[in-house]
Amino acid sequence: MSTTLLDIADDRHADGRAPDLARRRRGGGASKAGSGRRAGRPQSAGGPAGVAQGTSHTPVLADELLELLDPQPGQTAIDCTFGDGGHARLLADRLGPRGTLVAIDRDPLAEERFAALAAETACSLRFIRAGYAEALEQLSDEGVRADMAYFDLGMSSMQVDTRTRGFSYSYDAPLDMRMDPTQALSARDVVSEWDERRLAQLLRDFGEERHAGAIARAIVRRRAQTPIATTLELVDTINSAIPAPARFGGGHPAKRSFQALRIAVNDELGQLDRALPLAWGVLREGGVLAGISFHSLEDRRVKRFLGARARGCICPPDLPVCACGREPEAALLSRRSITPSADEVARNPRASSARLRAARKLTDEQGAPA
Ligand SMILES: C[S@@+](CC[C@H](N)C(=O)[O-])C[C@H]1O[C@@H](n2cnc3c(N)ncnc32)[C@H](O)[C@@H]1O
């Protein structure tokens, strides 16, 4: 099965062991946390101002993540993508009053949600509003050591459902898509200023959009006449470039282009490439690094990063004895990526493309190449 951005296939060639968890997940099974305290909360309530007041992010693969991280009282955890704090809240309960949770997010809305969590939890909490790469660098400089760190990548329901932020192709809103509203580059800048070639490459590379060239051409043609300032103006432009039969079936025609734009605006892949080694570096021996991805560009990075650390000898197979002396510095905690159960997807369709991977740090020595 080939991997695509929007529908990730399991890797059938991953090395490492397949623990009970992975086997049980593929067989379905009840989800304690997923159906627990957060179930039943409103998914979206876009107010008149377009701000989704009642929106909460249902944490994806929450049971599975908790089982892999196995938080214990008094430990330290780093949530690199706090969002609505869904995962963080579950962890904080387990870490208890002697534990510490460091939360990172670049969205000020997440910081507001963090304040609500801080008021209701006994564990020691700290929030860093920054890109996770910068925040992890800061933690590393401070000498912070953690027992677990995790990423729940992509955007939160709060971001998608807050209409004014322009993440969604379903609402008309200014073309924005910045997770950090103070950053300079917005989706409108990309759509207005990038040349046709660069736009086509963006749509191809970050959206695997088959009609990338035609869409880029349509954008450049339209903006020469009138600015493309809103999400629905962009949707209209994309629709005009995609042949009618291709517009039906296979999801919303603008889905891939919006994903590509969001990835570029927020430098999502650059942040992840920088952050993974930093997160690994702050882990103590025995610590666990976990990543939940929603498309193959992210998942591939997490998989390769963890896989490289789990690799032992890299000598050519015809060498009679090992000359590299390399020992694995990680143990993969599942052989394949872990996916949500049918139950979870039915409860929360946004979980459908999620893939979880995790590894335990075996040694604190820096040995494996990236
Ligand atoms: C999928 S949501 C996390 C949801 C969270 N786990 C929960 O259960 O509520 C992803 C969050 O990560 C944040 N984020 C994405 N990329 C980031 C980055 N490079 N640095 C900091 N935060 C980032 C987004 O702003 C968003 O709030």
Image: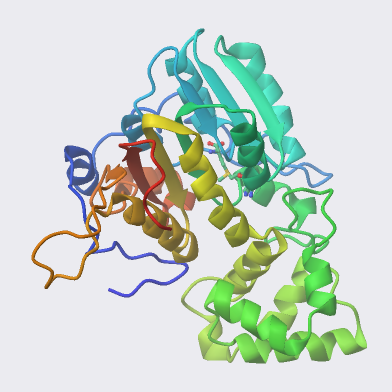
Judge by depth and name the residue closer to the eye, 370 or 359: 370
**Horizontal side of residue 301 vs 158, given as left or right:** left
**Horizontal side of residue 351 vs 135, given as left or right:** left
Name which quarter of the figure residue 28 lies in.
top left
Judge by depth and name the residue closer to the eye, 311 or 119: 311
Instruction: Specify the color scheme.
Output: rainbow
Residue 173, image x and y in percent?
80, 60
Name which quarter of the figure residue 157 lies in.
top right
Vertical arrangement, residue 266 with respect to residue 112, above or below: below
**Horizontal side of residue 21 vs 354, given as left or right:** left
- Identified at 27% across, 42% down, the residue is 333
Name which quarter of the figure residue 55 lies in.
top right
Residue 308 visible at all: yes
Vertical arrangement, residue 242 with respect to residue 263, above or below: below
Residue 25, image x and y in percent?
24, 44
**Horizontal side of residue 95 vs 204, given as left or right:** left
- Identified at 36% across, 30% down, the residue is 285
Disc count in the image? Answer: 0
Judge by depth and name the residue closer to the eye, 117 or 28: 117
- Identified at 31% across, 53% down, the residue is 337
Q: Quadrant of the N terminus?
A: bottom left
Residue 55 visible at all: no
- Identified at 51% across, 89% down, the residue is 245
Residue 217, image x and y in percent?
73, 91
Residue 367, image x and y in percent?
37, 49
Vertical arrangement, residue 276 with respect to residue 229, above or below: above
Q: Quadrant of ligand 1?
A: top right
Judged from this view, the residue extending furthest toward the left is 320
Q: Quadrant of the C terminus?
A: bottom left
